[in-house]
Image: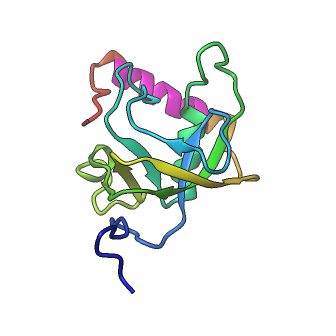
Amino acid sequence: MTDTANPAPTGPDAGATFYHGTRSDLKTGDLLVAGWKGNFQAQALSWIYFSAALESAIWGCELAKGPPGDETARERIYIVEPTGDWFDDPNLTDKKFPGNPTRSYRSRAPLRIVGEVETWEPHAPEVLAQMKANLAKLKAEGKDVIID
């Protein structure tokens, strides 16, 4: 029976396994919420970001800043469940990757942690260094804009 008072959240890739890469030490049942500084910006963001592609979450945790005072915190990939509707992430889906091959999404509603990916293949150090250099170049050129 459908619960019309509390419909299930909807969005692209409904039914997929979703991931969130970070350096925060969290546990199953915790909620990830919007309102925190993003990995790439100094301002707090009004969306929480996640992906249905493990590769995108790997980039997320590898590029994440650690919690204040612990910038070298362990990289983590959490399996998450949206608690509200979600949408394509326009930062990646408009012009950068038309059609959303990164399967990247965002929501204003919290994401519930339902598990953690224990093993995954990190990017080679030189690949990660190149990505960080590219991001630094964008920042220096003032092109590191996040559509919030």
Farthest residue in the top direction?
69
Which residue: 39% across, 37% down?
34
Q: Position of residue 88 (x, y in %)?
A: 30, 56
Query: Does 138 appear in magenta?
Result: yes
Which residue: 35% across, 76% down?
3
Query: Does 13 appear in magenta?
Result: no
Q: Give the range drawn in magenta.
A: 128-139
Query: Considering the image in quadrants, where does the C terminus appear?
Result: top left
Q: Quadrant of residue 91?
A: top left
- Is any part of residue 123 visible from this angle? no
Type of secondary structure dominating the magenta stretch: helix
Farthest residue in the bottom direction?
1
Front residue of this view, candidates 35 and 43: 35
Which residue: 44% across, 57% down?
82
Q: In which quarter of the image is residue 74?
A: top right
Side of 81 relative to 40 (left or right): right
Front residue of this view, candidates 118 and 130: 118
- Is any part of residue 27 visible from this angle? yes
Image height of 8 relative to 36, above or below? below
Farthest residue in the right direction?
119
Which residue: 26% across, 48% down?
90
Image height of 42 relative to 125, above or below? above
Q: Position of residue 129 (x, y in %)?
A: 59, 29
Side of 71 relative to 87 (left or right): right
Query: Considering the image in quadrants, where does the N terminus appear?
Result: bottom left
Image height of 141 relative to 119, above or below? above
Front residue of this view, candidates 20 and 114: 114
- The number of numbered badges drawn on the structure is 0
